Amino acid sequence: MNYIPHTDDERREMLARIGVERIEDLFEAIPEKFRFPRLNLPDAVTEMEAMWELGALADANADVNHHACFLGAGAYNHYIPSLVDHIIRRGEFFTAYTPYQPEVSQGTLQAIFEFQSMMSALTGMEISTASHYDGATAFAEAVLMSMAITQRRKVIISRAVHPHYRRVLRTYTQFHPNIEIIEGDPTTLTDPIDLNTACVCIQNPNFFGQFEEVTGLADRIHAAGAIFVVVVNPISLGLFKPPAEYGADVVTGEGQPLGIPLNFGGPYLGFFCTRREFMRRIPGRIVGETVDREGKRGYVLTLKTREQDIRREKATSNICTNQGLMALAACVYMSVMGKQGLRQAANLCYQKAHYAADQIGKLDGWRVWTDKPFFNEFVVACPAPVKEINDYLLDEHDIIGGYDLGQDYPELQDHMLLCCTETNTREEIDALVEALAELT
């Protein structure tokens, strides 16, 4: 939308309407010494010239439109069908907020309902919400719900859960009395689970891209009366077993891979799916289907009131939103892709990552983790510091490299997490391998 300035007559009319003569009169209440000085702006340019300048500045950024990208670690560069953007930019969706008034919000309510239905089908769970800012907050809410249901304060979390998710959980729970958060290696999940445990949390595939051994894990967790929380990559569910099939009670994760651009970190979408027995304890909002007094199908916020979330200690959540625009994007994406499209995207991610891992594993000085099966990410032990490698890849080859695991895991200095999605061509992968070979 172009900027259309007001005329001098229009400015005088507006000022007269509010009872002042000059714009400066609006700032009389501010002491003169604190008023912002006159801006030293450059000479005016045309809109076309301004766009040229802004475009040149944008082109200086390292972005996935101009560089091959092998960075994942929770945010992924997937292909997004053009229909997604066309739908979410419609004014009736683009400006909508939480649909408290169903009589004027049926479109938004139905979109959220469809999103919930698709996420339930994707994860195998019975209930889904659309109320969380991102995967980290959805995960933290799952832990808080587990503590509220079990009335216990011990939380066991695999260290292979995304480190940012674990940090957000500690922020959420820092003022909860007597909470005990135990972080351990995935292998420690085979240890006995005592009766003080509220929940056991894993990520599958985990932060390193690997699949965890889950056989029998849910039975041991449930035998102790605890809740089983699983963080997932939703794209992986197009190809692999959903968490409901191995006993998960709560499934959370980041919805960004489902049709939401990288956007330099947000806005994103956390999803939260659980069992029917917990539906009155879930954080956030849920849309239900009903009929009006004329028997016509309609949609409403259900099971809880808005006020429930602002009653502090009695609320199921104190930080949530319907995140409707991002939920709509995910809904449109899943609708356009369909079951076969999601499966194809997941399979391409899997095959391309395994091709890249196989080629890198043949290089002298580079070692790929192969002790567990993996999805679209894999760990590489590098012969040099990861920052130096990434700087070289970006400066010399226009390649965005992997995630430096040493930032979060001190024992993994010089280890890189590389990612492939369906957007990475074979030529890009071969160029990455050739560039890494130059460093050995």
Image (cartoon, rainbow, N blue to C red):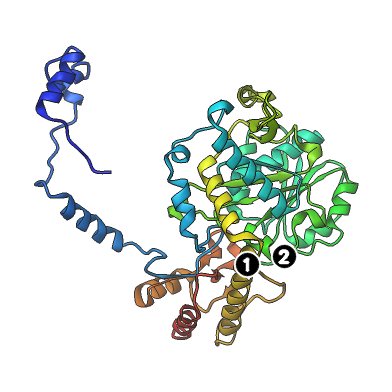
Q: Position of residue 249 (x, y in %)?
A: 78, 47
Choose between 374 and 83: the one closer to the eye: 83
Label drawn at residue 240:
2
Dot 1 falls on a residue whose secondary structure is helix
Which amino acid type corresponds to the residue marked 1 in the rendered image? Answer: Ala
Q: Residues within 10 Å of mark 2 (few under 14, many from 20)?
A: few
Dot 2 falls on a residue whose secondary structure is loop
Choose between 89 and 207: the one closer to the eye: 89
Q: Which residue appears at 64% of the width and 30% of the height?
A: 301
Residue 378 in view, yes or no = no
Q: Residues within 10 Å of mark 1 (few under 14, many from 20)?
A: many
Task: Classify 18 as above or below 188.
Answer: above
Q: Are marks 2 and 1 in contact (CB under 8 Å)?
A: yes
Disc 1: which residue = 346
Choose between 260 and 331: the one closer to the eye: 331
- Asked if residue 58 lies left or right of residue 6, the reply is right
- Asked if residue 394 lies left or right of residue 78, the reply is left
Tell which residue pokes out farthest to the top in this image.
19
Residue 114 in view, yes or no = yes
> How far, Cα to Cα, is label 2 from label 1?
9 Å
Label drawn at residue 237:
none
Q: Which residue appears at 75% of the width and 45% of the height?
A: 155
